[in-house]
Image (cartoon, grey):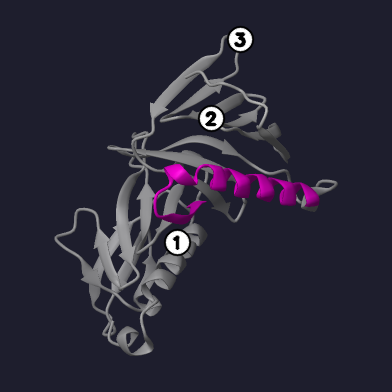
């Protein structure tokens, strides 16, 4: 997908582990680049160009949301696009180590670039307040904070796209993909981890629902459960005590 450069573009740069990360925000496009690849948003399309002996291009029509996520706890930047089949992670960059010379200032520049990128792509991110990705490589899961709920996406084995596996509402309603219906869990103390599962139970300790998140570490799984617990625990103390 071609785009037109213009004089009003606003260049911004930050150091990444694979080279200089650059962001250009123009009147008609948003361009994000690393030495190895370039991502361009223009109108209703996004194009990824991988710079090899012969450039290889892939394009997607932006019919769903675009999500700019930061990794917990490594601060990586990931860009996901949504279509009818789920969420696809199409671009990533990692900040340089804090232990490197100037590591803290480099991370601040990386944070500024990510913040500007999120603002530039907000027209493609309807109702998305923030997003985090947890895990490593292809096994990253995505948590998207939407106005009324928190969505959890995970990639099934041998699949390219992450699927919505859980929706936790701020009203305490939890919907697990494939379950018969929603359950009510309005307290963070009703969300815990057991093996590969995030488990939801009532105040009597009875199981309400559970969802498998097998491809991340136990520490990552506990972080996911903590964030879901914070989401469902946003009712009044009286309502929470009954969940």
The verdict on residue 129 being magenta is yes
Residue on which the image places disc 2? 28
Q: Give the residues drawn in magenta, as a range.
A: 105-133
Q: Secondary structure at mark 2?
A: loop
On the image, the x and y values in percent for residue 27 come to 57, 33
> Mark 2 or mark 3: which comes first in sequence?
2
Q: Residues within 10 Å of mark 1 (few under 14, many from 20)?
A: many
- Furthest residue toward right: 101
81 sits left or right of 48 in the view: left
Q: Marks 3 and 1, Cα distance to the nearest angstrom?
A: 40 Å
* 114 vs 73: above or below: above
Q: Would residue 213 be visible to someone looking at this image?
A: no
* 34 vs 109: above or below: above
Q: Marks 2 and 1, Cα distance to the nearest angstrom?
A: 37 Å
Residue on which the image places disc 3? 53
On the image, the x and y values in percent for residue 89 come to 45, 37
Residue on which the image places disc 1? 224
User: What secondary structure prevails in the magenta region?
Assistant: helix
Q: Residue at x 47, y 19 (%)?
A: 1
The verdict on residue 114 being magenta is yes
> Mark 2 or mark 1: which comes first in sequence?
2
């Amino acid at each position: 997908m071609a785009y037109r450069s213009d004089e009003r573009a606003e260049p911004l740069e930050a150091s990444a582990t694979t080279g200089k990360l650059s962001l250009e925000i123009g009147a008609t496009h948003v361009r994000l680049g690393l030495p190895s690849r370039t991502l361009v948003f223009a109108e209703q399309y996004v194009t990824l160009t991988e710079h090899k002996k012969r450039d290889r291009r892939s394009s997607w029509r932006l019919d769903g949301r675009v999500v700019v996520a930061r990794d917990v706890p490594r601060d990586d930047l990931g860009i996901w696009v949504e279509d009818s089949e789920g969420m696809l992670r199409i671009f990533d960059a990692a900040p340089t180590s804090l232990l490197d010379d100037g590591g803290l200032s480099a991370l601040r520049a990386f944070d500024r670039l990510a913040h500007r990128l999120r603002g530039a792509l907000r027209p493609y991110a309807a109702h998305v307040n923030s997003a985090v990705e947890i895990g490593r490589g292809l096994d990253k899961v995505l948590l998207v904070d939407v106005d009324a709920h928190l969505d959890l996406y995970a990639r099934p084995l041998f699949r390219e796209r992450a699927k919505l596996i859980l929706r936790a509402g701020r009203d305490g309603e939890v919907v697990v993909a494939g379950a018969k219906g929603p359950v009510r869990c309005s307290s963070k103390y009703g969300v815990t981890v057991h093996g590969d599962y995030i488990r939801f139970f009532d105040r009597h300790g009875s199981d309400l629902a559970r969802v498998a998140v097998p491809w991340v570490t136990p520490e990552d799984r506990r972080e996911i459960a903590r964030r879901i617990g914070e989401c469902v625990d946003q009712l009044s103390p009286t309502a929470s005590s009954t969940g």
